[in-house]
Image (cartoon, helix red, strand yellow):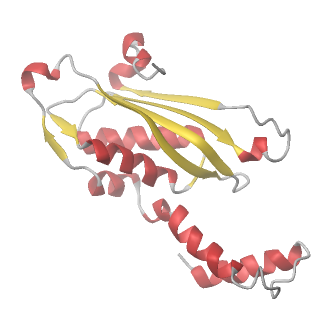
C-alpha cells in the first residue's frame, strides 16, 4: 500500500473541499488516514486462497458424529467499506455454518476469516461469497452457508438517509443451496 500517495491525495481532498490542511486539527490527518487505510484495507493484500491458507488451521472431526453435525457461528461483528462510495458498512453481523467433511476449523479462525475478507472495498453480496469460498477451502467442505446483516452509511448518512434500513444477504453452497433446514440454522435464534 502506497501510504505516501494516500497522504498526498488526502491533503488534496482537504483542499478540494475548502479546508486548510495546515490548520492545527488537520495537519496530521493525511498521515492518520493513510495509517487507518493500511489497517482497514489489509485484506486487499491477500487473495481468498491466501486467506484460507493463513487461517486454515483444522482439526480431525469425530467421524461418528460428522454426518449429522453442522458447525454454526453467529453474530461475528465486522465492518467494511462500500466500493461504490467508500462509505462505511457497519453494525454488520456475519453468521457462518458448514458441514465438516473430516476436518473442523478452529473457531477463532472463522472469525479471522470474516474479518480479513471484510478488510477490502466490498459489496455485502461479494463479502458473503468471499467468506463462503474461504471457509470451503480452509475446512475442505463444499457445504457452507453465510448470512450477513448490515447497515450502509451510503444509505444512512447520505442519499435517502434511512437510518433504520438493514441489508440481509445469504450465500449458500453445496447442501445449503437446496436444504431449507440447513438454511434455517443461519437464522437468528
Quarter of the C terminus within the rendering = top left
Q: Residue at x 27, y 45 (%)?
A: 138
In this view, 58 is above or below 181? below
User: Which residue ends up furthest to the bottom in the rendered image?
Assistant: 22
Q: Is residue 68 left or right of residue 46?
A: left
Q: Residue at x 23, y 44 (%)?
A: 106
Instruction: Report x, y in % for residue 168.
Output: 59, 29
Instruction: Report x, y in % for residue 175.
Output: 33, 20
Q: Which quadrant would residue 104 be assigned to in this image?
A: top left
In-front residue for pair 77/152: 77
In this view, 49 is above or below 164? below
Instruction: Report x, y in % for residue 180.
Output: 42, 11
Q: Residue at x 53, y 63 (%)?
A: 41
Q: Which quadrant would residue 37 be assigned to in this image?
A: bottom right
In-front residue for pair 102/173: 102
Q: Is residue 143 left or right of residue 35?
A: left
Q: Residue at x 86, y 83 (%)?
A: 20
In this view, 179 is above or below 46? above
In this view, 97 is above or below 153? above
User: Which residue ends up furthest to the right in the rendered image?
Assistant: 18
Instruction: Report x, y in % for residue 19.
Output: 88, 77
In-front residue for pair 45/150: 150
Q: Is residue 87 left or right of residue 159?
A: left
Q: How many marks?
A: 0
Amino acid at each position: 500500500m502506497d501510504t505516501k500517495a494516500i497522504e498526498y491525495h488526502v491533503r488534496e481532498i482537504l483542499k478540494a473541499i475548502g479546508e486548510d490542511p495546515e490548520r492545527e486539527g488537520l495537519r496530521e490527518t493525511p498521515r492518520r488516514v493513510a495509517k487507518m487505510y493500511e489497517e482497514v484495507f489489509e485484506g486487499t493484500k491477500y487473495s481468498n486462497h491466501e486467506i484460507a491458507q493463513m487461517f486454515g488451521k483444522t482439526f480431525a472431526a469425530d467421524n461418528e458424529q460428522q454426518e449429522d453435525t453442522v458447525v454454526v457461528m453467529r453474530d461475528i461483528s465486522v465492518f467494511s467499506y462500500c466500493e461504490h462510495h467508500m462509505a462505511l458498512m457497519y453494525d454488520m453481523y456475519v453468521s457462518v455454518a458448514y458441514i465438516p467433511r473430516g476436518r473442523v476449523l478452529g473457531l477463532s479462525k472463522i472469525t479471522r476469516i470474516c474479518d480479513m475478507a471484510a478488510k477490502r472495498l466490498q459489496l455485502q453480496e461479494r463479502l458473503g461469497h468471499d467468506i463462503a469460498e474461504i471457509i470451503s477451502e480452509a475446512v475442505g467442505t463444499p457445504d457452507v452457508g453465510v448470512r450477513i446483516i448490515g447497515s450502509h452509511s451510503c444509505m444512512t448518512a447520505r442519499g435517502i438517509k434511512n437510518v433504520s434500513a438493514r441489508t440481509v444477504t445469504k450465500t449458500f453452497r453445496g447442501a445449503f443451496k437446496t436444504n431449507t433446514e440447513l438454511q434455517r440454522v443461519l437464522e437468528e435464534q
